[in-house]
Image (tube, rainbow, N blue to C red):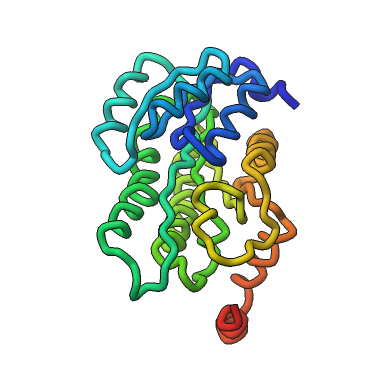
Amino acid sequence: MTGFFAGKRYWIIGASAGIGAALARELHRRRASLILSARDAGALQALAADCGDATVLPLDLGQRDTLVRAVASLAESKVDGVICTAALYDPARVAELDAARSEDLVRVNLLGSLDVARLCPPLIAAGGQLVLFGSVAGYFGLPNGQAYSATKAAIINLAESLRTELAPAIDVRLVSPGFVKTRLTDKNSFAMPALITPEQAAIAVANGLQRRSFEIHFPKRFTLGIKLLRALPYAASLRLVARL
């Protein structure tokens, strides 16, 4: 299943670790040319060594000017897709949230994705892909995830609106992972159902981008259950959540 990506150029924002890094390796395996961005330039350089001729372009979605400069540096050439996986995660009960960290989280997760959606489309070749990462955490408000879940719910909404607004010139996709074993989910103090590896997530994303569906969600044995929770009347769904 390498043909779809062969010879195409993808820009992955949030590539230094977790799903982003695993996805870079998977798309390289499928013969895509890559541009790799994140805050950690050293991690990007190490990843680039595993990804052939990957271009390293450090930036911080928490600092809008760094994205502006990165986009300007790529203005003379087109890409076939922009994938934004970058996110912060800080689980806590709402009364225990640190205000400054919550502001950083919203700046990166939501406003950063909005900046990507605003600034990157001119770089994308006709029919190319703009891929935003939501989460099953955005399907329904769950305890201890308020700030993160709220940003992911907003990204789902953003991707839905962009799907129509940017069509047919740009193929907007939404990725909604369940629990993936990364340094972010390592912060969780509970047993995570249907936990998968970043490599498994990367394969699911790459396979999904080759298909036509707007949303790529996985693992379905978990995500379909959360979708059902969303579909229930609040009288039932909130009662179920209260048992968690």
Residue 212 can be seen, yes or no? no
| Residue 10 drawn at (x, y percent) | 52, 25
Q: Quadrant of the N terminus?
A: top right
Left or right, 196 with respect to 173, comes to: right
- In the rendered view, would you say 158 is above or below 47? below
Residue 235 can be seen, yes or no? yes
Q: Quadrant of the C terminus?
A: bottom right
**Residue at (64% x, 66% y) in the render:** 226
- In the rendered view, would you say 168 is above or below 231? above
**Residue at (38% x, 38% y) in the render:** 116
- Using the image as rendered, state which of residue 74 and residue 36 is in the foreground: 36
- Using the image as rendered, state which of residue 86 and residue 236 is in the foreground: 86
| Number of dots carrying numbers | 0
**Residue at (70% x, 58% y) in the render:** 194
| Residue 34 drawn at (x, y percent) | 52, 21
Q: Quadrant of residue 225?
A: bottom right
| Residue 183 drawn at (x, y percent) | 51, 48
- In the rendered view, would you say 211 is above or below 70? below
**Residue at (60% x, 46% y) in the render:** 214
| Residue 124 drawn at (x, y percent) | 45, 26
Left or right, 116 with respect to 138, comes to: left
